[in-house]
Image (cartoon, rainbow, N blue to C red):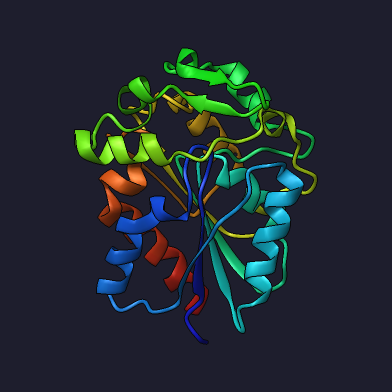
Amino acid sequence: MTEPTVVLVHGFWGGAAHWANVIVELDRRGHTGIRAVEIPLTSLADDATRTREMVRQVDGPVVLVGHSYGGAVISEAGNLPNVTGLVYVAAFAPDAGESPGQITEEHPPAAVASIAPDSDGRLWVQPDRFRESFAQDLSADEALVMAVTQKAPLGSTFGDTVTDPAWRHKPTWYQVSTEDRMIHPDNQRRMAARMQPQRTIELAASHASLASQPAAVADLIEEALRAATA
């Protein structure tokens, strides 16, 4: 079987470039089928539609990888027949009828006060709090670039619910960030446990584990690739 293409889906307050270190790590290991989708962060329906469009462009199997809110997106978009597995990186994994906002309310994260709306209904991580909130294990320069280039979601997206989560039908892997201040680690553990993944790993990482620990994240993605070709 052909090795699947990895399709990477970013989350709130980031873009496809948040995957830069994971992309380089996978490429160094010889994985050439890598794509990163840029989603609009305007609604779960819009973001899932854009992700499905990317997946349909791939001639062959796909492993979907979602960070943060990207986990909700791959849960909604991942039922396409060529998707062979789902990898969640410090990510939301809502059940049917559940939203990221509902999950957040169960165990509010440490940095919830750092999020502020603008006059257009978009939510921002306050730039002067971005590093301490989102990426405390990155350098000041790396966190500065993330803060300045952050992509703010429409606040209504937090309330959008998943319909038929792909994790109920596909093999899954989950990475918990134990020092996460954006999605409470206990929420991550609960979401991981109920999907009964092939493997759950815990990293002593911030919400930006994809940037701070790309080798460990790539290891988990490789496991999903191996399972698809076994």
In the figure, is residue 220 to the left or right of 212?
Answer: right
The image shows residue 136, relative to residue 19, as above or below, that is above
Q: In front here: 184 or 211?
A: 211
Pinpoint residue 186: horizontal percent, then vertical percent.
Answer: 47, 24
Pinpoint residue 86: horizontal percent, then vertical percent.
Answer: 55, 57
Tell me which residue sits at (65%, 25%) in the image: 101
In the figure, is residue 147 to the left or right of 96?
Answer: left
Tell me which residue sits at (72%, 61%) in the image: 79
Pinpoint residue 208: horizontal percent, then vertical percent.
Answer: 36, 39
The image shows residue 207, relative to residue 70, as above or below, that is above
* Visible residue check, residue 159: yes
* Visible residue check, residue 169: no
The image shows residue 161, relative to residue 48, as above or below, that is above
Count of numbered marks: 0
Q: In front here: 115 or 102?
A: 115
Residue lying furthest bottom? 1
Tell me which residue sits at (71%, 44%) in the image: 44
Residue lying furthest front? 119
Tell me which residue sits at (52%, 87%) in the image: 1
Quarter location, residue 180? top left
